[in-house]
């Protein structure tokens, strides 16, 4: 270590440049926002994602897994130059990463990024100066280029120009649509979990909100006590096996096909839903209280995504998918608001879930508005020392081979 003054920029003699990150949480779910030190990536946003996957996956593992992260860590890599930024459609791009790889969409990180980008200067966000502040609504708008498309973000802003943590950030997601409603999904023998109790199929819904989700009620999954009778381990096994039953069945490929572009995608997550479970009574004046005002209905969900990572937040992309699904079922009309809780937001009076509503209807999809709150938790500079046997890598206790 060549620097023992911890107030000065942290450095080490090692194989990589220091990586600087701001840390935030959205409804309990972390976002590690990387703004410098990640290896160079060039080209379109998806080309940059391909390069990150092919050449820099050890950096993802370094930053997401232990000892610098953990199994359920989530990250965002700022990409100031993308084709949509050059075309003037987006202000900045971003790549999302998790315990398994890179994702196409992330609502909770978008909410965090909204605040962070408004608070940044041009050394971090080169086009910060071009953002428009609307003094009437006291909001700043920005367009974020994410792997699944363009997301329009509205950030409450104070007269100082900094983001206002007391009002929710909102975004309009990419066109969202249901791909199947109440579908009977066969569960072949090797994929059956104990709570199925001999059943050979389950009924589930499928929907897209920037990523593809399978939505199944706790009861249908075999947990009659719902999410209130939480058994994370058994629910992990059940959703993992259900995901395998779906992804290994070639007849179900259409469930992850984009209704607007025709592109083939992949199943990102299985979310367990519970319509009987709302938020605990929120305290007056808190974000939890404000989120509950004016909502028509609420429900709670538990999202397993990527390699069975658990989202602490209500999963913004899945809120878009669930709103599109509720609309397809005729249960949510334009402007009607539903509060989506995670197990974390549901159990904390002052924490807000995400509010979802249909913003606009298109021919084969709907545009969904999602609102939520994000907060700063800290700041990191990550280094690797030459002598460190772990090197530029991370590990997970779950996947350790001994
Ligand atoms: O809010 C979201 O959309 C994300 N949270 C973690 C998993 C999803 O990508």
Image (cartoon, grey):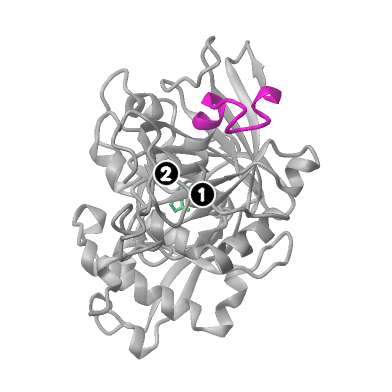
Question: Mark 1 sits on what residue?
Answer: 106
Is 82 in front, or is 362?
82
- Image coordinates of residue 307 in percent, x first then y, are 39, 67
Residue at x-position 30% and y-position 56%: 70
Residue 92 higher or lower than 212, as above or below: above
- Image coordinates of residue 144 in percent, x first then y, are 63, 40
**Does the closest atom of ligand 1 sit within 8 Å of the Cβ of label 2?**
no
Looking at the image, can residue 20 be seen? Answer: yes
**Does the closest atom of ligand 1 sit within 8 Å of the Cβ of label 1?**
yes
Q: What is the total number of numbered labels drawn onto the structure image? A: 2
Residue at x-position 41% and y-position 20%: 166
- Image coordinates of residue 160 in percent, x first then y, are 52, 11
- Circle 2 sits in a helix, a strand or a loop, which is it? strand
The answer to whether residue 364 is magenta is: no
Residue 84 higher or lower than 256, as above or below: above
Provide the residue span drawn in magenta: 115-131
Numbered mark located on residue 31 in the image: 2
Quadrant for residue 211, please give it. bottom right
Residue 341 higher or lower than 163, as above or below: below
Numbered mark located on residue 255 in the image: none
- Direction front: furthest residue: 2
Q: Are marks 1 and 2 in contact (CB under 8 Å)?
A: yes
Q: Could you tell me which quadrant the C terminus lies in?
A: bottom left
- Circle 1 sits in a helix, a strand or a loop, which is it? loop
Looking at the image, can residue 224 be seen? Answer: no
């Amino acid at each position: 270590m060549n620097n023992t003054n911890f107030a000065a920029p942290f450095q080490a003699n090692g194989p990589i440049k220091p990586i600087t990150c701001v840390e935030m949480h959205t409804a309990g779910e972390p976002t590690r926002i990387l703004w410098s030190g990640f290896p160079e990536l060039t080209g379109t946003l998806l080309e940059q994602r391909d390069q990150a996957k092919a050449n820099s996956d050890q950096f993802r593992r370094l930053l997401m897994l232990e000892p610098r992260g953990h199994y359920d860590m989530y990250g965002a890599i700022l990409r100031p130059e993308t084709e949509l930024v050059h075309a003037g459609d987006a202000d900045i791009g971003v790549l999302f990463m998790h315990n398994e790889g890179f994702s196409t969409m992330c609502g909770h990180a978008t909410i965090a990024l909204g605040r962070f980008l408004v608070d940044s200067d041009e050394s971090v966000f080169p086009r910060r100066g071009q953002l428009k502040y609307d003094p009437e609504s006291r909001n700043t708008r920005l367009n974020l280029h994410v792997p699944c498309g363009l997301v329009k973000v509205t950030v409450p802003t104070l007269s100082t120009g900094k983001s206002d943590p007391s009002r929710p950030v909102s975004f309009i997601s990419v066109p969202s649509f249901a791909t199947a409603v109440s579908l009977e999904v066969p569960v072949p023998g090797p994929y059956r979990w104990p709570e199925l109790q001999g059943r050979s199929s389950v009924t589930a819904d499928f929907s897209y909100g920037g990523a593809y989700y399978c939505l199944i009620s706790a009861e249908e999954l075999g947990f009659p006590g719902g999410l209130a009778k939480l058994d994370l381990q058994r629910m992990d096994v059940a959703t993992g096996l259900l995901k395998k039953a779906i992804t290994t069945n070639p007849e179900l490929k259409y469930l992850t096909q984009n209704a607007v572009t025709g592109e083939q995608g992949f199943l990102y997550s299985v979310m367990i839903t519970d319509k009987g479970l709302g938020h605990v009574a929120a305290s007056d004046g808190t974000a939890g209280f404000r989120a509950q005002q004016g909502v028509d209905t609420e429900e709670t969900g538990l999202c397993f995504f990527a390699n069975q990572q658990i989202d602490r937040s209500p999963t913004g992309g899945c809120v878009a998918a669930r709103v599109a699904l509720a609309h397809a079922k005729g249960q949510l009309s334009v402007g009607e608001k539903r509060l989506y809780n995670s197990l974390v937001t549901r159990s904390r009076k002052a924490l807000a879930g995400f509010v979802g509503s249909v913003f606009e209807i298109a021919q084969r999809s709907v545009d969904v508005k999602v609102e939520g709150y994000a907060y700063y938790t800290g700041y990191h500079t990550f280094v690797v020392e030459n002598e460190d046997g772990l090197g530029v890598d991370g590990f997970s206790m779950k996947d350790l081979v001994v």
